[in-house]
Every structure is written in C-alpha cells, then in structure tokens.
Amino acid sequence: MERRLSAILAVDVVGYSRLMEINEVATLAAFKNHRSQLIEPLISQHHGRIVKLTGDGMLVEFPSVVNAVDCAAGIQREMRQRNADVPHEQRIEFRMGINLGDVIVDGDDLFGDGVNIAARVESLAPPGGIAVTGWVKESIGNNLQLEFEDTGEQTLKNIGRLVRIYNVVLDAGSSPMTRMTIPAAAHWKTGIAVLPFSTMGSSTEQDYLAEGISEDIITELSRFRNLRVIARNSSFSFKSKDIDGGAAARMLNVEYIATGSVRRSRSRVRVAVQLTHAPSGGEVWAERYDRELTDIFAVQDEVVRTIVVTLEARLGLAIADSARSRNMPSLAAYECLLLARKYVTAHEAERAMPLVERALSLDPDHSLTHSMLSAICYVRWLADPRDEYLDGMEAAARRAVALDNGDSKAHAYLGMALTYRKRFELAGSHLQRAISLNPGDTHAMGYYSEWLLRIGKAEAALAMLDELLERDPIPPTWYWEVRGLVLLLLGRYVDALQAYSRQYKQFWYIHGYLAICLVRLGRTEEARSEIEAALSVMPDPQAVRYQLVDEFEDPEYRKFIDEGLTLAGLPK
C-alpha cells in the first residue's frame, strides 16, 4: 500500500442544486467554462493533479501546500472578477477546503484521513472563500502574502479529534487580527507575555531599541522559575498587528500581558510600560521612565523588578535583590548587537559578522557579544560543516562563559558545540546549567532536547519539546526540525513528515532525514530524490553518511540512521 504526504484541495459549488433548478443549461455551461478556462489551467500551473470530479466539485492533489493555497487563492480572486457583473442569484461561487495530511494511493485515486478532513473543511468555508486546517497555515509560514482568520477548534464529522480551522483572508490590506474570532480560553494559565514595545517615531534605530528592551525583559523575567513567560518568538508574532493586549493574552493563554512604547530623542529615552490583567481587562500597574539613554539598562532592571514584585503575592515568586546580576556592554556595542540579531540565520550570517566585530572592537569583554559570535558560527556550521566554524563556535562560547558564568545562552552554545564534538557528558552539564540559569530559555530547551536525542533518549526529548511548546506556542522553524528527528527515531514516520513539512529544508541534512522517513513508508522514489538533494550540496556520500550517523552516541540510533540511508539509496 502506497502512502504519501499531500496537500488536498476540495472544491464545491455553493447552492449547485438551486442554480440547476433555475437554469440547468446555463449553469452547466458556466461551470464548465470556469473549469476549463480558469480552474484547470491554474491547477496545472501549480503542479496539481485532479484526482476526481464530483459533479459540482472536484478533489485536487498538490505536492506542495504552498502551491495548493496559492492556486486556491488565485481561483477565488479571479472568480470575484468574473462574478462582478453577474446577478447574485445566478453567480457560481466555490467553497474550498485544504488539508495537509497522509493519504493512501490506489491507482489514480486517494483515500484516508487527509482526504476526508479536506472534504469536511470545505463545507466550513464561506461562499467564495477558503478554509484550511492549522497544519496548512503553519506549513505555509511566510511564504505567501496571505492572512488568516482563526475560527477556533472545530468538530468534523467522523473525525475523532478537534481540528483548528482558519479562513484565508483574500481582501488586500485587511488585517485578520481585527476580524479574528478569538477562541474563549477554558481557563487562564498563570503566566505573562511581553509584547514587542512600539516606537514613537519612524526611526529604525528606535525600532531596534524597542525590540531590544522587550526581548531583554522577556529574558530576565524567564529567570524566575515559578513564572511562566511566553517566549520571544510567540510574543513577537504580534509585532505590527492591530490587536489589543487582551486578545493576544487569549491567543497565548496567559493571565498577564505587558505592553509598552519607546521614544528616543538625542541622548534621552522615554519608556512607558503597562501591566494588564487579561481576564478582567484591568490595568495592574503602569509607569513612565524619562532617563538618559545611558541609563536604559537601569530602566530594564526597574521594569523587570516592578513586574515581579507586583506579581509576587499572586504567584509566590522568589524576589532576588536584583533582577539582573550581569554586566551589560556599552550602549554603542549593545546597539550593534540589536542590529545583528536579525541576521543570525544560515543565509544572512555574513551580514551579522561586521556588526558583531564592531561590537567586539567597542567593548571586547562582555559575554553577550561572544555569545552572538558563537551563534553566528553555529548557523554557519549547520549550513557548511567546516571545522573552522565549529572551532569558532566553541571558542566564542567558552570566552562568553569565562566572562559571565551566569549567561545561559553562552552555556547553551557551548553545550551544543561539545555535543557535536561528541563530548556528551560535559555537553549535558552545560545545557543543564543553561536551563537552571534561565528556565524560560526556549533555545536552551531545544538544544537540550537534541542532546537527549543524541544520547538515545528520544522519549525524554519529546517531553522536553512538548514543554517548550507550552512556553512558545508559535515556535521558530528549527523546533519542527528537531521534533521531526525525534519522531523519526521513535518510528512515527508520518508524524515526522508532518513536522518536517513545517520548516523549509534550510539545511542540507534535512534531506537525509526526510529520505529515511520516506523509504520507511515505502515511498522509495521520493526517498531517492531527497538523497539526490542532499548530495547536490554535499557531493561526497561518505561525508553525508558520517555527518548524519556519527553525531549519535547511542549505537542503536546510529545503526538505524545508517540502514535508513542505505535503503534510501545513499552509496556506501
């Protein structure tokens, strides 16, 4: 039995029976015209395949979820133009539903939950609209300029679990946040989200400063063990969105929300902060700080301490004498780091390096700068595993730890460098130290999950990833990469493919792991294509095998990965 992961589009005509009753000939002719002149050509352009026609609708398979949604949006937009001059009662409008899931292949036909859910989702779409499952929305990421309305978790006929459904917003310039149906929280979880502070003015410099203040407050609040703090990635997903704090708190399921603004004028800065109790909508505390710009770190300390003291009685937090015991770099070096943060990716690391080098020249003795240098070397090494990058990652992390033994990120990067050096015991101690210093550091949690996996503890790794998702409900794409590998080693191949579909193969080795998933599911040709993709970046098969197998301490995992690569067609 052949199975594969596919994006399924279900299409149906709204009120087809009523239209046929009014004018059977004209309705049939118009439907065929739309299908032949618009729908079928767009499906072909997006590499789709019509699986079956259902009289007044169809079922279409796409190899890419991005292509499926882009095609559906194109059809619906064009149908609006075609219907502009048609009387409402004579218009042919489509409902569309899209799901990403595992399907069973039988000749040219498809079966399974992946298909059934798409058909059920289609019935929930508004006339002329598109409904998609949460898996589809998450898989698209930022690949399409589309927005989505959250309609909440829905019960679908003959589907034994709730499925979150989103409507695609086709109106240009509309904001889904202003139209979103916010699901009511069954109960509020005690915790806090710090939304990105806004800027009073148009200066890019102010944007970076506001982001830096928000992010540092999140980091410092996360140090308190009894306080559940939503991670930066999820909180910052609301940047530039027209949504109030209460709605954001509902979506992140936290009881408290912190918001603020920053205005910079020459050498002075004004920071306004508000803490709101989301269930009641009441303002718990608000303050405005007018200080010299050089005092910005003191302002951060005061904000953190005030928030923690305010919540102490309610949450039982242990209050330290100082929220921040670490030294901070000079303001000029700090601003370089704020600018560099956004470029610490596999494809933009070169843009971050001059900024970090500038920060080092301005202030060479602060751990934050060396931690960021370690991060840059890390993403470089993932994209191109040269020894010089791993050497740089380890050296920078060691320097950061030496400068500040309380820097959780420095311990996390050193732990990962030592993991790749196969010094697993020492690596584990640094990763545990990172989490003990900052229990809310989701990057450290992710790295610790990967370390658990490397030493043969996939179940424990999955539990840690589940805990991470509590703190970061909208996780970065690397989360799905680690989760995919965990699920692969647990033998949950379909779930692993689902996880991998939510990130974008930014590193060559993901092709290797995908190949193992596919070949274990009997999808040999697709597996060989993934092996070819890996070899297109790393032409030496032995290097590919070494990199994918040798990173595991557990001999059973090593054997499993090695056998999977061979089955998928990687030359010995």
Image (cartoon, rainbow, N blue to C red):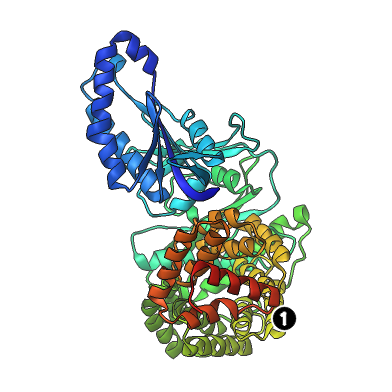
| Label 1 secondary element | helix
Q: Is residue 540 above or below residue 204?
A: below
Q: Residue at x 33, y 42 (%)?
A: 71
What's under tag 1, amino acid-wise? Ser
Quarter of the image for residue 162 reads top right
Q: Which of 464 and 266 is in front in this view?
A: 464
Residue 323 appears at what percent x and percent y? 67, 71
The reply to whether residue 264 is visible in this rendering is no
**Residue depicted at 53% across the width and 36% down the height:** 117
Q: Nearer the viewer, residue 150 or 132?
A: 132
Mark 1 crowd level (few <14, some 14–19, many ≥20, 10 Å Cα): some
Instruction: Find residue 121 and report its horizontal and vertical position in percent.
Output: 50, 33
Res. 126 image quadrant? top left
Residue 190 left/right relative to 510: right
Relative to 501, residue 75 above or below? above
**Is 320 on the left or on the right of 182, as rendered?**
right
**371 relative position to 72: left or right:** right
Q: Can residue 135 be seen in this view?
A: yes
Indicate the position of residue 558 as horizontal and vertical percent values: 64, 76
Residue 286 located left or right of residue 6: right
Question: Which residue is under mark 1?
Answer: 429
Which image quarter: residue 538? bottom left
Residue lying at 40% horizontally and 79% vertically, measured from the top left? 539
Q: Residue at x 42, y 41 (%)?
A: 108
